[in-house]
Image (cartoon, rainbow, N blue to C red):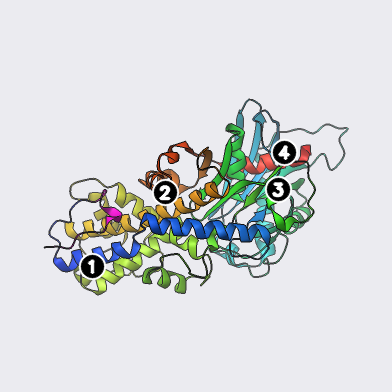
Amino acid sequence: MPPILSSIIRDEIKPIDGASDSQLSAIDGIAKEFDLTVEKLSEIVNHFCNEMDKGLEKSGMTVAMIPSFVTGIPTGNEVGTFLALDLGGTNLRICEIAFEGKGVINVKQQKHKVTENLKTGPANQLFDFIADCIDKFLSELVTVQFENDQSENDKKFKMGFTFSFPVEQTAINKGTLIKWTKGFTCPDAENKDVVFMLQEALKRKEVPVVVAALVNDTVGTLLSHSYKDPDTLIGIIYGTGTNGAYFEDIPKIKKLNKYSNDSEKMIINIEWGAFDSEKKVLPLTMFDNKLDRESNNPHYQIFEKMISGMYLGEITRNILLHLIDRMLLFDGYSSKELNRHYSFETEYMSTIEADESHALDDTKKVLEELLNIPSTTLTDRQIVKRVCQIVALRAARLSSATLAAIITHCGRVESGSSVGIDGSLFEFYPHFSARIKTALQELFGTNADKIKISLARDGSGVGAALAAMLTTKK
């Protein structure tokens, strides 16, 4: 009789037709490695709360808890036109955001692909490219006219800059890059002020733009969602990368020392990707360790590597190769494509999990046409789907732990809170949001119903423009 499968996927799985005892035993063993019981989740939540406290008290902690210096909260009645620049992954996006009051927003935008050469070459080359893209956007799409009697500085467009990498921020428009992530490695940019580098490039290219505010994409998401829902407490990204931000009481940000401001709260950019780099509570498997060891930033962003879209496909690929090596999948045959790092994209996982056809036809297409596996049986395809479920479910449950930790830290378990979430994993990956909500119910019981989770599209663009507006008005 085949072994009982781990409870991690008990409610979601279908039987694997024709699987041998060896295959079922192997899958069950992997499922148990990825299992996250409510007791383990609670342990992670408690440890995360402790790490938040450490980060608020002192700089340089694993969970950085970076002050954003954004202290204004949008009302939804703001009016004005501002630019937004969003750099955080494969694409660079430039927007003109027109706020018309009563929550009405109009957006014009252009996207540009950031090539591998730009990601890894000299910093000046990257920022000159950005300046050229902004200049192109202004000439093609922006129609705002300045008054003749305005000063030269007033005749410059005010821009919010969403920079989705770890920075040590010292003012609303100053931030030092701590370390590149998401495949960027420009060697001469770390430990430098990214706003200064961008402003210098704009100056070199004679582009009439002033960078008024620097924000992380999670800060932007929080601001954007607050524009629609003033009760918003948390903004989160679950996409290529992952991170969170929330409104913190300024007196609790002890490392700010004698910071003086009339406001009561400031947005904190948590930078949770590096959580538990010390490997105290996270249930790392050999598949996670292999991914980390072979990545371009070993021993860094451990948590992000377990839950973000950039890495989930690679974890899955590592598991599939492990099963192939044990002659438990595809008759022991791989392919040149599957053997290549990061070839099994997280988008493939999404397609496979969404495949409800009897013969798993879409799964077959991914495996045989896109990855060139010589041939697959229905049993093979069901095993692949099971592996995708195991990896993605753990990611969602780990994601719930950080959300639960922030709500606990802020004392909002019983009163509830509103959460805005952006990112392709949350928006498009099958069952991802439902799995988060299920885990919150396990942690908080009926209080989980008081947590209002909503999709916050385009948070990074609208939020950056809002930050520029709030800063300019101050």
Which residues are drawn in magenta? 1-13
Res. 182 visible in picture: no
Q: Earlier in the sequence, mark 2 or mark 1?
A: 1
Q: Is residue 90 magenta?
A: no
- Residue mark closest to the camera, 4 vs 3: 3
Does residue 288 appear left or right of residue 81 in this picture?
A: left
Q: Residues within 10 Å of mark 3 (few under 14, many from 20)?
A: some
Distance from the alpha carbon under mark 2 to that under mark 1 = 29 Å
Residue 349 % position (x, y): 34, 54
Q: For mark 2, give the secondary structure.
A: helix
Task: Tell me what residue is drawn at x 82 percent, y 39 percent.
Answer: 154
Write down the residue under mark 4.
Answer: 469
Res. 435 visible in picture: yes
Does residue 242 appear left or right of residue 327 in this picture?
A: right
Q: For mark 1, give the secondary structure.
A: helix
Write down the residue under mark 3.
Answer: 250
Q: Which amino acid type is marked by label 4?
A: Met
Q: Which amino acid type is marked by label 3?
A: Ile
Q: Which amino acid type is marked by label 2?
A: Leu
- Residue mark closest to the camera, 2 vs 1: 2
Write down the residue under mark 2.
Answer: 443
Q: Earlier in the sequence, mark 4 or mark 3?
A: 3
Residue 110 % position (x, y): 59, 44
Write down the residue under mark 1.
Answer: 26
Distance from the alpha carbon under mark 1 to that under mark 3 = 51 Å
> Magenta stretch mostly in which secondary structure?
loop
Distance from the alpha carbon under mark 4 to that under mark 2 = 38 Å
- Residue mark closest to the camera, 1 vs 3: 3
Distance from the alpha carbon under mark 2 to that under mark 3 = 28 Å
